[in-house]
Amino acid sequence: MRIGLFFGSFNPFHIGHKAIGSYIAQNTEVDQVWYVVSPQNPLKQKSSLLDQYHRLQIIRRDIENQNDLFVSDIEFSLPTPSYTIDTVVNLSEKHPEHTFSLIMGGDNIKTLHKWKNYEQILENYFIYVYPRYGFDFKLSHKHVVYLKEVPMMDISAMFIRESIKNGKDMSSFIPYKAWKYIDEMNFYK
């Protein structure tokens, strides 16, 4: 099976994340998208992160009945901070029956050269890049696939967190089951 790995802190998981995953699973060579919940991104601060198990549970509840979307906690058992190359190599060893590729936003492709062993990623894995507003940087490489005709949503997890903290209803920005769990647990308030 061809698996697209969508890495992120998903703090919180929102409709943009779900739409991108669904789009890629239904409109590319990828058979299934795995949301890989990162305990700590080496390029981001950890201070505002909701506990990793809650972030995993939020996604799990929302996609539990979808065959083309899956959530992975693989990075919970790996050293932190999480490095993409370590995770992909680990998954490739654990699941030799699958072919893995990466999914990233156009904003991330510009900083790929700062990633640990980025050359190894480029040489061994396809990267599906979805467009982001304000980022038109292009890296020309045989394994980099730029997605076109993708529905674009300019939704920020930080905006959602701040809005919830300020008592605003963010149920339109978060998938129903994920929102229900966040609201019941009083997260981000």
Image (cartoon, rainbow, N blue to C red):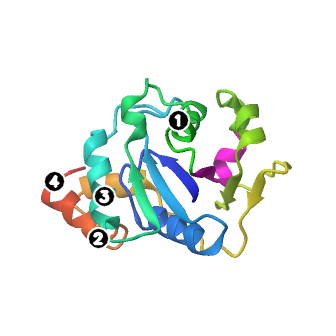
Query: Which numbered circle lies on residue 60?
Result: 3
Residue to which mark 4 is pinned: 186
Q: Quadrant of the N terminus?
A: bottom right
User: What amino acid type should be assigned to the residue bearing mark 2?
Assistant: Ser
Element class at badge 2: loop
Name the residue: 57% across, 74% down.
26
| Residue 65 locus on image (x, y percent) | 32, 71
| Residue 16 locus on image (x, y percent) | 48, 65
Q: Height in image: 48 above or below 14? A: above
Q: Height in image: 133 above or below 22? A: above
Horizontal relation, residue 37 to residue 189: left or right: right
| Residue 111 locus on image (x, y percent) | 69, 38
**Which of these two is toward me, 4 or 81?**
4
Q: Quadrant of residue 83?
A: top right
Residue to which mark 2 is pinned: 171
Range of magenta residues: 98-111
Marks 1 and 3 sit apart, C-alpha to C-alpha, by 20 Å
Marks 2 and 4 sit apart, C-alpha to C-alpha, by 13 Å
| Foreground disc of the pair 2, 3 | 3
| Foreground disc of the pair 1, 2 | 1
Q: Find out whether residue 102 is within the magenta segment.
A: yes
Element class at badge 3: helix
The mark that comes first in sequence, 2 or 3, is: 3
Residue to which mark 1 is pinned: 87
Dot 3: within a 10 Å radius of its alpha carbon, few (fewer than 14), some, or many (20 or more) residues?
Answer: some
| Foreground disc of the pair 4, 1 | 1
User: What amino acid type should be assigned to the residue bearing mark 1?
Assistant: Thr
